[in-house]
Amino acid sequence: MSHELDLDEDLKLLLTQLKRLHYKLREHTKKKYKRINPFAEDLFDWKEKGAFWGGKNVTVYDSTTISGDVTIGDHTWIGPFCSIDGSGGLKIGRYCSISAGTQILTHDTVKFSLSGGKCEYEYAPVTIGDCCFLGIHSIILKGVKLGKHCLVGANSLVNRSFGDYSIIAGVPAKKIGEVRVEKDDVELIYFNRSDSNKSSR
Amino acid sequence: MSHELDLDEDLKLLLTQLKRLHYKLREHTKKKYKRINPFAEDLFDWKEKGAFWGGKNVTVYDSTTISGDVTIGDHTWIGPFCSIDGSGGLKIGRYCSISAGTQILTHDTVKFSLSGGKCEYEYAPVTIGDCCFLGIHSIILKGVKLGKHCLVGANSLVNRSFGDYSIIAGVPAKKIGEVRVEKDDVELIYFNRSDSNKSSR
Amino acid sequence: MSHELDLDEDLKLLLTQLKRLHYKLREHTKKKYKRINPFAEDLFDWKEKGAFWGGKNVTVYDSTTISGDVTIGDHTWIGPFCSIDGSGGLKIGRYCSISAGTQILTHDTVKFSLSGGKCEYEYAPVTIGDCCFLGIHSIILKGVKLGKHCLVGANSLVNRSFGDYSIIAGVPAKKIGEVRVEKDDVELIYFNRSDSNKSSR
């Protein structure tokens, strides 16, 4: 009995309408795009969000947070579940893919927590060059500078800087190969062609 | 002063009602299930979402996206923060657990990004057999075929195929053991019983 | 034609108002905090959510789920995209940072899934001491006990217990150093100062 949901008429109506709206938007998205989105991703527009922050043809999912001093280059795609933290200053280049769950941090609270709140937060800027692909759940820590055309493997933890055309992967990330960009093609050249180096994305 | 939130009467009312609805639903969920959900997970029903996509007794959290050609077997559970991408074709078996944050991809934009938009997206189908357990944040890349009764360790990156009853883990994932399914029990047999091989989930 | 979104007047109005509310809240958040949040994070208050569950000055993001028997110490911060599962019993200390995407589990469905639903769920309690920093996407499995002032590296999988002042990282996590807390400072002492051991956060 105490587990009954007890709503007044106004809230019953709102809940009913939110569900009806969800079902209508979901139906539309499924018919048009053959997908089901989280409710909020159906309500709002990814490119509108990118434009609101600033940047031409930039995509940012609703579930992603952007904060602080962040500039994002044109045509960059930022997926769901990301934290794009510019509290210490962050520049992201053009044509980047920031895959789902990527966390780019320009601060940390490591010493703050470990000291029970006595130490301060720490900050350092991050730069991501043009045409970088950051794999799913990759983590970029404060102070990192990535060159252009870098490929960061999924699940990597990047805690130091790498130059242009690097393929990096691992925890912590190491350089495992090089990207070669030809006229209209891209070649991924791994230093060691053993199985374990195919892990880069 | 410029930081004051400035809402007209309609929006004030809507915000108030959304909060009241949230608090009521949250109270109900806490009393009934001893949990607090994200707002959207309280609004909608996980099994209704699974049924809408197609599949009997399938659970899909609101925050998870399903897209493209995806079939999901009966009794499969798909948690929050997942991307279930069937743009290249995806079949998921029965009784699977797809843990929180799992990303199953049948396409990638690696060369598209690295080339600054000159190369095309790439696609390949994925199959997940019946009774597979995909650990938290596991990533399944395009072209992978997993057999039945496989156990994929948390944080794994799976970039090649594995047969039935495999225990796999790591970045990239390797086979580290075998699943033995008895009448009413399951035994996990690791190839090397050292500490590092207990990592599988 | 069949791809047109077809809403009645009530739903058109609701959708319009949700968008207007989103834009207003977003504008306010951007001006005041220089950030853009997911819609739901703008609607509700992180500290109100923490207080609702119980705990003084506790932060819990909307996208995070808390369930079961969970106690959370004062001043603890729990970011977005986390699962804080106390179905098997969970205690989290004071002044902890639980970074984005952290999953703390006191149950698993490994054998349930692998057996096609024949085996039961399994449970074991977890304890996290005071002043612990859990890095992004870290995973704490059932049965783990972490001491005070521990630092858990990003992307780690913790499947066994560690004492006070441990620095741990990896899949599965191993002890790679020690935290030294001085009067107002914290020193991180790694066992091996090679590059690979700087991975701890």
Image (cartoon, coloured by chain):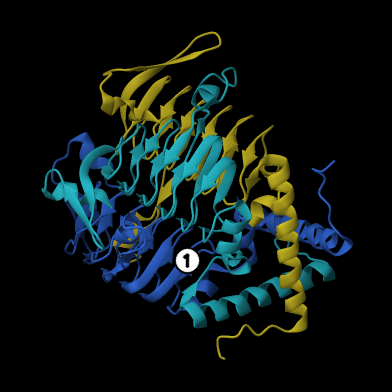
Chain colours: A cyan, B blue, C yellow
Q: Residues within 10 Å of mark 1 (few under 14, many from 20)?
A: many
User: Residue C126 placed where, x, y %?
Assistant: 45, 37
Q: Provide the residue designation for mark 1.
A: B65
Q: Is residue C98 left or right of residue C108?
A: right
> Measuring 59% from the left and 58% from the top, which residue is drawn there?
A51
For badge 1, the amino acid type reads Thr
User: Residue B18 placed where, x, y %?
Assistant: 75, 60
Q: Answer yes or no: is residue B159 visible.
A: yes
> Measuring 29% from the left and 25% from the top, which residue is drawn there?
C197
Is residue C156 placed above or below C63 in the rendered structure?
above
Q: Nearer the viewer, residue B71 or C23?
A: C23
User: Residue A136 placed where, x, y %?
Assistant: 38, 52
User: Residue C96 placed where, x, y %?
Assistant: 54, 30
> Measuring 81% from the left and 57% from the top, which residue is drawn there?
B16
Q: Is residue A177 left or right of residue A95?
A: left
Q: Is residue C136 left or right of residue A26?
A: left
Q: Mark 1, chain letter?
A: B
Can you say which quadrant of the picture contains the N terminus of chain B? top right
Which of the 4 quarters of the picture holds residue B122? Answer: bottom left
Secondary element under disc 1, as helix, strand or loop, is strand
Is residue B105 placed above or below C74 in the rendered structure?
below
- In the rendered image, the residue lying farthest to the bottom is C1
Q: Is residue A24 left or right of residue C132?
A: right
Q: Answer yes or no: is residue A98 visible.
A: no
- In the rendered image, the residue lying farthest to the top is C183
Is residue C99 placed above or below C27 in the rendered structure?
above
- In the rendered image, the residue lying farthest to the front is A183
Counting the numbered discs, the total is 1
Q: Nearer the viewer, residue A168 or C161?
A: A168
Q: Nearer the viewer, residue C146 or C88?
A: C146
Q: Nearer the viewer, residue A98 or B201?
A: A98
